[in-house]
Image (cartoon, grey):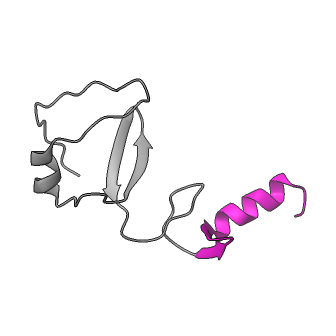
């Protein structure tokens, strides 16, 4: 991943929101009301088009199972079962 400095800075509003400038949305191909997946890495926030289902706990895109309308990976299910003392 190549990081490009856009020179754009925005303040968070009182609810913690920011607005992505239209030029940036257009250049990245983000449509109005586009669903974005939010990741964090070190002290960075990474936004990505939500094009495929992801694990609600880890963001993993592999080995997913749907439960109650949410996607969960087998790895998360195993971790939760261990935490609950079931395995």
* Residue found at x 41% / y 71%: 52
Residue 40, horizontal then vertical, whole percent: 43, 42
Q: Is the C terminus in the top left, top right, bottom left or bottom right quadrant?
A: bottom right
Q: Quadrant of residue 8?
A: top left
Q: Is residue 26 magenta?
A: no
Residue 23's spot in the image, x, y percent? 9, 47
Q: Residue at x 51, y 72 (%)?
A: 62
Q: Position of residue 31 (x, y in %)?
A: 22, 61
First to last magenta residue range? 64-87
The answer to which of 5 and 27 lies nearer the viewer is 27
State which quadrant residue 3 falls in.
Answer: top left
Left or right: where 79 falls relative to 30? right
Instruction: Identify the residue shown where x is 60% and y is 55%.
Output: 57
Q: Look at 56% across and 63% down and name the residue there.
A: 55
**Front residue (pair 14, 75):** 14
Q: Which of the 4 image quarters holds residue 29?
A: bottom left
Height in image: 2 above or below 9?
A: below
Estimate the x, y position of residue 51 in percent, counting from the top left: 36, 69
Q: Is residue 65 magenta?
A: yes
Q: Is residue 22 above or below residue 53?
A: above
The answer to whether 24 appears left or right of 64 in the picture is left
């Amino acid at each position: 991943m190549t990081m490009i400095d856009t020179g754009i800075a925005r303040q968070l509003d009182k609810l913690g929101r920011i607005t992505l400038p239209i030029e940036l949305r257009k250049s990245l191909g983000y449509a109005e009301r586009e669903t974005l997946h939010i990741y964090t890495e070190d002290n960075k926030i990474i936004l990505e088009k939500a094009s495929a289902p992801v694990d609600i706990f880890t963001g993993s895109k592999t080995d997913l199972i749907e439960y109650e309308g949410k996607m969960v990976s087998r790895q998360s299910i195993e971790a939760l079962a261990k935490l609950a003392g079931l395995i």
